[in-house]
Structure formats: structure tokens, C-alpha cells
Amino acid sequence: MGILKKMGVLEDLIEKAGGCAVVDGGLSTQLEKHGAQFNDALWSAVCLIQDPDLIKLVHLEYLEAGSDILITSSYQASLPGFQSKGLSIEEGELLLKKSVELAVQARDKFWDAKKKESGHSYNRALVAASIGSYGAYLADGSEYSGCYGPSVDLDKLKDFHRRRLQVLVEAGPDLLAFETIPNKLEAQALVELLEEENIQIPSWICFSSVDGQNAPSGESFKECLDIINSSNKISAVGINCAPPHFVQGLVQKFKELTGKLIVVYPNSGEVWDGRAKRWLPSKCFDDEKFKLFATRWRDAGAKLIGGCCRTTPSTIQVISKVLKENSGP
């Protein structure tokens, strides 16, 4: 299903970016800086309903900062989640499509302006449709534990993801970004679903990690990556929303376990309490730390680098600048 896209689109972007492309940063963090409030199970997806223009503004801020890839505002957007707010299935599907449309509109507006300027250092960004884990929909912190309970099996996970996946693909993104996957079971469900739906858009699957060694479920990354390595539908694999001090070791580990492209976009190091829905104080990376470590992650083998929760356009700007300054010939 969906329009056939060239499978090398991600590799082409990485080459144009000098060997390492820049992913954007924390969407909800920047929306909050503009006054949005997310005490809601839909989290940043509530802005799709309340203030879509603000989402587009934040996308533009990340493009200006140097992002080569925009991730849509659909991470915590799901049809069951929208229905729980009293919306119909049709209304929910329109909101999912809107998440892609907003990012595409921002990208096209930005690129139409930049391509008229001589000597700019920007690339035409790709739009990655965000698909959060089942645990993100539950909004109980289980994307950081992988504990879905005995009633959640392979078929239930595929059923949960299927229609959202179809709708997002129909909206026409360049990529699919499966984010904060916490266990082997959900990775298996996504691999099978991409095959069953014959998805032709390149995908990445990113896991979270709470110990810097394994998936949140405690399963080894080797077990998880063995499943992903069997799929030609997945172009990249990596880590998102994990503490940045885990990243270098995980990139090195993933480099040994897979031939896929490696993508990393950690959070700032603050810890999210999924039950209390608040950030806990902890050791954090500031922009200067991201600047220092971005080249180390690139040198270790990462081909796509950005930021997740609590990172901002200023974080992405320093990452983009240092990677461009230190790119290969």
C-alpha cells in the first residue's frame, strides 16, 4: 500500500549532509516554551486539536536550526487515544494526517525560501511520521519498562498499530519513525506489520534503554536486532529518549550487531516519571555537552543524530554546526 518511494532516500540525505544527517529535537519541549500545556494522555498530540499552527512554527524553528529530518507530532497520537477524547475514528484519522501535513508544509515553506538563497548550508529535509510504542498510548511509563502484561500478545500489538500506520503512510511522509520501542515483542510486531502491509516507505525503529545495556524489558539488544536485521523494510535502527551518556556505548554495541544505519536522538538526561507525569532532577547534558559528544557518536558509527525530550532548537543548532564543520570530504 502507499506510494512506492525510493528506498535509498535516507542514504541520499546522509550523503548530502556530509556523512551524518541531523534529526530534530524535542517537539513537546519547544511547544511548552511557547506556552502549550500537556497535562493530558495525548501529550503533545493535543496541539493537533488545539493549536496546529504552533506545531508548524516549531517545525520551522528546527529547520532553521539545521534539522535534516522533521519528526511529526503523532508520537502519542492514536485512534484509541483520540476516541477517548470523544472524537470519532474519522476525526482521529484526519488529525493523524494533519500531523504529516503540518511537517510537510513547514518543510516546503522553508525549502522554497532557502533554495532561492545562494551559499546556504541546508538540505531539503525529510519528514518522518512518528509512531510511538504501545506504551506511549498507555501513558503509564511502560515505554520505559516494556511491561505490557500477559494480555498483550503479538496480534494485539499489530492490531493496535495497523490502522494508524496505514493512515500515516497515506498522508505521504518520506519516512516512518517507530519510537521508544521497549521490548522484542513489539519489534517483532512492527517487522511483521511492515511486511503484511507491504510498506514501501523506509522505516527506522528506535528503542529506549534504562540501563545503557539492554532494552527496557531487560531483553538483550542482540535479540531485538536479530529480528530487525531480517527485514528489508527497516533502513535504520537506534536509540531515542535515553540518557545521552548511554549513547556512545550503545552505538558501538549496535555497530557490532547490525548493518543497518544507526540513528540516535537521546533526551537531555532528565528522567521522566511516567506515573507522576513530571521530570525528575538528574544529571543533564547542556548544549555544549551535545556539541562535544555529537562528533563522538558520529565517529562511533551513528549516521543520524538529534535530540529528544528536553532538547531544543539551540541543541540542534550546535549539533548541526559541529557535524557540518567536522564532516568528511
Image (cartoon, grey):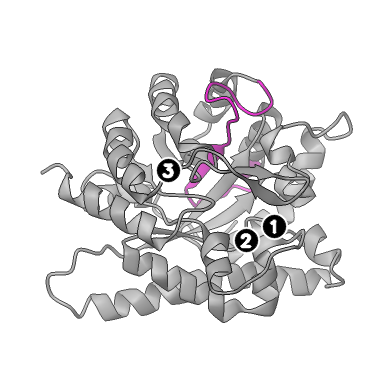
Tell me, yes or no, if residue 135 can be seen here: yes
Vertical placement of residue 95 versus 248, above or below:
below
Q: Residue at x 48, y 36 (%)?
A: 237
| Amino acid at circle 3 | Phe
Residue at 74%, 63% in the rendered image = 39
Q: Nearer the viewer, residue 267 or 201?
A: 267
For label 1, the residue is: 164
Is the residue marked by circle 1 packed among few (<14), some (14-19), or many (20+) residues within 10 Å?
many
Q: Which residue is mark 3?
A: 285
* Placement of the N terminus among the 4 image quadrants: bottom right
Of marks 2 and 3, the one in the foreground: 3
Q: Are marks 1 and 2 in contact (CB under 8 Å)?
A: yes
The three-letter code of the residue at mark 1 reads Arg
328 or 160: which is nearer to us? 328
User: CB of mark 3 within 8 Å of CB of mark 1?
Assistant: no
Residue range corresponding to the magenta coloring? 194-218
CA distance for labels 3 and 1: 34 Å
Q: Residue 25: which numbered mark, if any? A: none
Q: CA distance from mark 2 to mark 3?
A: 26 Å
Q: Residues within 10 Å of mark 2 (few under 14, many from 20)?
A: many
Residue 288, percent across and down? 32, 47
- How far across and down, in percent of the image, does residue 186 sit? 69, 35
Residue at point 38%, 23% (across, down): 252
Report the residue marked by disc 2. 74
